[in-house]
Image (spheres, helix red, strand yellow):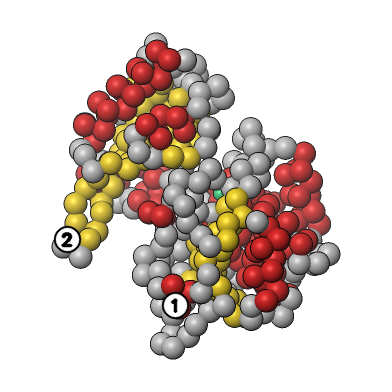
Amino acid sequence: MIDKAIEVAQNGERFLVACHRRPDADSLGSALGLIKTLRAIGKEATLFMPESIPDSLLFLMENEEGIAEVPEGTRYDATWIMDIAAKALIPPRFPSADVTGPLVVVDHHHAHDDIGDVVVRDTSSAATGEVVVRLMEGLGLESIPEGAATPLYAAIVSDTGGFRYANTGPATLRLGARLVEEGADPWQVAYQLFERWEPARLRLLSAITATLETAFDGRVAIMRVTREMLAICGANDDMVEGMVNYARRVDGAEIGALLWEWQVKTPAGSHVETKISLRSSGNADVSQIATALHGGGHRAAAATQLDISIDEADELLRAELAKYFADA
Ligand SMILES: [Mn+2]
């Protein structure tokens, strides 16, 4: 489908580019990389950003300004949506099909829902940022467009955990080197993404790790975060991102899990649901467990969200883990 996406880029003039809900570095970095690419071939491209961008990602924006709403009467030739595998992750206030034009999905996850009129989904890529570079090459660009090296490098660094995860292959490392040659600054990106923590986030880490329990003879490490913990620490939900990795770090744990009380806002008010984030340290396929719990993801990282309490989610997770280990 990459040829179709290339055709869409060549044939259109005016594009909207969106991230998934609660954008991360891969989604935003690949969106910005694509925007610079489209402009480099003479097209108009605008970032759709209806949500606030986490502080750790603001450095990617430089002079770019997203729009939270499409101006009245504007129509796009196509809308690109980056790093998305599930309908539930379409950002809020996403414009209707007559405004967006055809939807082009660029992603590297296994599809959870059937979304997109044109889908470029390469599950062998470590990051959506990598897929953007292939689009760029398909469009005949020989060098990385001005301003695209840093966001694309950030996309890859983020999704490979700083070139550490199992998805880090020779091609990913070569692309990293190329992006550094083209101007990305490794320390600046690592500092912004990984090293710059607010005091509240460190307090939250301490509170979350204090809930650590191991189960299944130490093969699983489970932690939780409640609304109350967030309030006590003065922390927000963005700060929970990545905390599940601390569960996976537990020596001997094949699976790390984080149960997360998640505030869902609806026009009728708000209620609390529970997210379950899962990470594998190598052998376990956590996407199987997440899928059984109506979620999805990769072998090494998967998640689900359920409209039940955190204690119920804990029980359900343990029941699913018991099945998983019995079958394995
Ligand atoms: Mn990604």
Quick one: 66 or 77, which is closer to the camera?
77
* Other residues around mark 1 within 10 Å, as few (<14) / some (14–19) / many (≥20): few
Q: Position of residue 143 (x, y in %)?
A: 81, 65
Query: Which amino acid is tagged 1?
Result: Asp
Q: Nearer the viewer, residue 258 or 246?
A: 258
- Residue 269 has which mark? 2
Q: Quadrant of residue 182?
A: bottom right
**Residue 25 horizontal side relative to residue 12, left or right:** left
At a point 73% along the width and 63% down the height, the residue shown is: 136
Secondary structure state at the residue bearing disc 1? helix
Q: Is residue 260 above or below residue 113?
A: above
Please tell me which residue is depicted at 59% across the width and 48% down the height of the picture: 108
Q: Residue 112: where, in percent of width, then height? A: 45, 45
Q: Which x, y percent locates residue 221?
A: 40, 23
Query: Which mark, residue 50?
Result: none
Could you tell which of marks 2 and 1 lies nearer the N-terminus?
A: 1
Q: Quick one: quadrant of the N terminus?
A: bottom right
Amino acid type at mark 2: Gly
Q: Residue furthest bottom?
A: 73
Secondary element at tag 2 = strand
Residue found at x 37% / y 21%: 321
Task: Decide if residue 108 is on the left or right side of residue 24.
Answer: right
- From the image, tell me which residue sits under label 1: 98
Farthest residue to the right: give it: 142
